[in-house]
Amino acid sequence: MKNRLSRLIQRDGRAMFLPIDHGYFQGPTTRLEEPGKTIAPLIDYVDGIMLTRGILRNCVDPAINKPIILRVSGGTSMARRDELDQEGIITSVREAIRLNASAVSMSVFVGASGEHQTLLNLARLVDECEDYGIPVMAVTAVGAELEKRDARYLALASRIAAELGARVVKTYYCEEGFEKVVRGCPVPIVIAGGPKVDSEMEVFSWVHDAIQKGAIGVNLGRNIWQHDHPVAMAKAIRAVIHENATPKEAQQVFESERLAA
Ligand code: 5RP
């Protein structure tokens, strides 16, 4: 368990994960139509990639030496948006071991009709993964209900995920009270980015503030690979996470990388 976690969480205690799992319910999302091409220029700047077995098998060179966080929950689609919270476990732990995953990830939908089912999915998955020393990263998912992302909700969902045995929790950033989300969650927290926003500075500010308040890093996808300058975004966010860059310094990294490209 410690060995796998140490592949993902770096010696400085921080982590930058790149999720490219969105197709498991969104299909060929914009700029993730060919995931292998999306990640090729980014892979050197991230500490791990989160994806499904189908994309790992078909689109990622097995020789890449990058830790894998294997998404193992799903079974829903955007075609039935009201049922996004009805996920099941779609990949076995045996398969995760065979694919040499450093961790597995799955979603819980606290406060939705799928709450009970997805929390039991988490508990059962943790039981099985602990036998093999595989960390489970719980994703506190909100489906289409993005407005749910306030500190009270995120603290509730993150704490429950940790209580049920998640070794890492992926949640969202919130401007007000994020420190309470971190304080109430006894395992490391990484933040997602959510849908792409227009300003790079906004993303750098979220990441910086989240880290100041105790997050260990990010599991952040669309605001990197849907950007017109994904490598510049990745390098700037990396500077915030691993070099303690301020949002202003990150913007400078972004601008100089953008011009150099
Ligand atoms: C999809 C996920 C994503 O991995 C997560 O939301 C992070 O990606 P983004 O920064 O694009 O929101 O779990 O359910």
Image (spheres, rainbow, N blue to C red):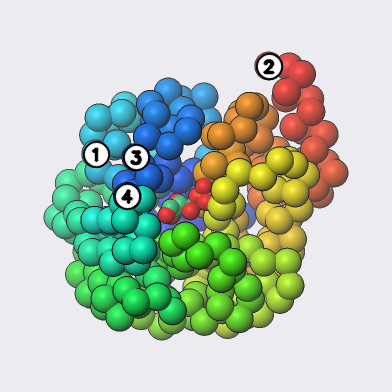
| Residue type for callout 1 | Gly
Q: Which mark is residue 229?
A: none
Please indicate, yes or no, whether residue 228 appears anywhere in the rendered image: yes
**Mark 2 or mark 4, which is nearer the start of the sequence?**
4
Query: Based on the displayed image, in which of its 4 quarters is residue 134 positioned?
Result: bottom left
| Residue type for callout 4 | Ala
| Residue type for callout 3 | Gly
Indicate which label's residue lies in the foreground, 4 or 2: 4
> Gap in Å between the C-alphas at discs 2 and 1?
31 Å
Q: Secondary structure at mark 2?
A: loop
Please indicate, yes or no, whether residue 245 appears anywhere in the rendered image: no
Instruction: Describe residue 195's horizontal placement relative to residue 29 as left or right.
Output: right
Q: Locate residue 225, reporting x and y percent.
A: 54, 34
> Gap in Å between the C-alphas at discs 3 and 2?
30 Å
Query: Based on the displayed image, in which of its 4 quarters is residue 130 positioned?
Result: bottom left
Q: Which residue is mark 4?
A: 79
| Residue type for callout 2 | Ala
Q: Which residue is mark 2?
A: 261
Q: Which residue is mark 3?
A: 27
> Gap in Å between the C-alphas at discs 3 and 1?
12 Å
The yes-or-no answer for disc 3 within 8 Å of ligand 1 is no
Q: Which residue is mark 1?
A: 54
Indicate which label's residue lies in the foreground, 2 or 1: 1
> Gap in Å between the C-alphas at discs 4 and 2?
38 Å
**Mark 1 or mark 4, which is nearer the start of the sequence?**
1
Above/below status of 255 relative to 196: above
Q: Locate residue 39, reporting x and y percent.
A: 46, 30
Count neighbours of disc 3 (C-alpha within 10 A) and say few if under 14, some if 14 to 19, many if 20 or more: some
Indicate which label's residue lies in the foreground, 3 or 2: 3
Q: Secondary structure at mark 4?
A: helix
